[in-house]
Amino acid sequence: MIQSGESVVTAKKEADYVLGTNDEELDRLGLQHRVWRPTVLECWRRAGITFGSRVIDVGAGPGYATVDLAELVGPTGEVFAMERSARFLEFAKKACAARGLTNVRFREADLMKESLGELEYDAAWCRWVASFVSSPEKLIDEIVGALRLGGVAIFHEYIDYRTWRLAPRRPAVESFVEEVMASWRATGGEPDAALNFPMLFRAAGLRIVEANPRVLTVSPRDYAWQWPASFIEINLVRLQELGRVDADWAEAVRREFREAESDPMTLLNTPMFLEIIARRE
């Protein structure tokens, strides 16, 4: 039972997450980070994040990337983890404490309502946040304002979510992808947020240094298959909780995906995102 006004606000903020903040989503985010971790570490290296760097983790979630960043920059560096979910932030704090990391500071805040401030940091890391916020323009402006001149902003953000398809095609799974996109838009987000980045970057004073498409094509035998597989199951439940779909529709998607998974010749294409490194000028 909720006991206080503060608890009501916290519960509402958690419920506002279109993908949820439950234990299953925590596990899925951990799997997601493991799948993309080699790509992320290489991206950070090219962006110049190294020992002694000061980095903002924007939308830090449960802190999987926060831990990696803190270990990378070392005790003379610093990571500032900003996240609006109190539950995710508590998980991140515990993960850092368990590893003895003392170079991380945390802030529970919603950048759509608050400001990062002029922090003069060397870099900012922002993964799959712009697709969910009401104003990607404000998000980018806040990030740029918190960087020193010459600092870098690093984004992983979707540019073509409909590339999530199976070969051979599975119509129920394709309808699931469309429903996911519609659910994000219903809460003010935009699945293909990176399409607007060049215009927003120009206005904010960012120059794109690198822009690389990132997409995987995997079979049921590949470890990375578990990433979309876990997303489907968790989000079928979530879409029903939101009242967007019924149980029969969800079961049709599950059945079709199980059929695809049982065929070793199936190929799955993941949603395409852009990996962008941009510099504040």
Image (cartoon, helix red, strand yellow):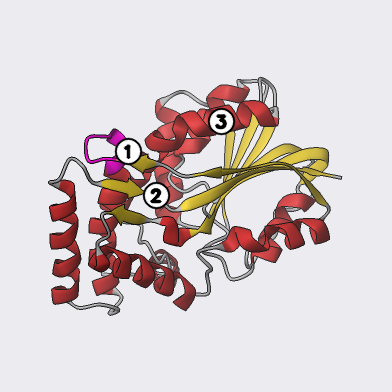
Q: Is residue 58 in sight in this rendering?
A: no
Name which residue lies at 25% across and 77% down: 245
**Label 1 residue SS:** helix
Q: Position of residue 9 (x, y in %)?
A: 45, 70
Question: Is 44 on the left-hand or right-hand side of 239?
Answer: right
- Amino acid at circle 1: Ala
Q: Earlier in the sequence, mark 1 or mark 3?
A: 3
- Amino acid at circle 3: Leu
**Label 2 residue SS:** loop
Q: Position of residue 243 (x, y in %)?
A: 27, 79
Assess whether residue 223 is covered by the magenta stretch.
Answer: yes
Residue that numbered label 2 is attached to: 270
Compared to residue 241, the image places residue 81 above or below, namely above
Residue span colored magenta: 219-225
Assess whether residue 250 is covered by the magenta stretch.
Answer: no
Residue that numbered label 3 is attached to: 69
- Amino acid at circle 2: Thr
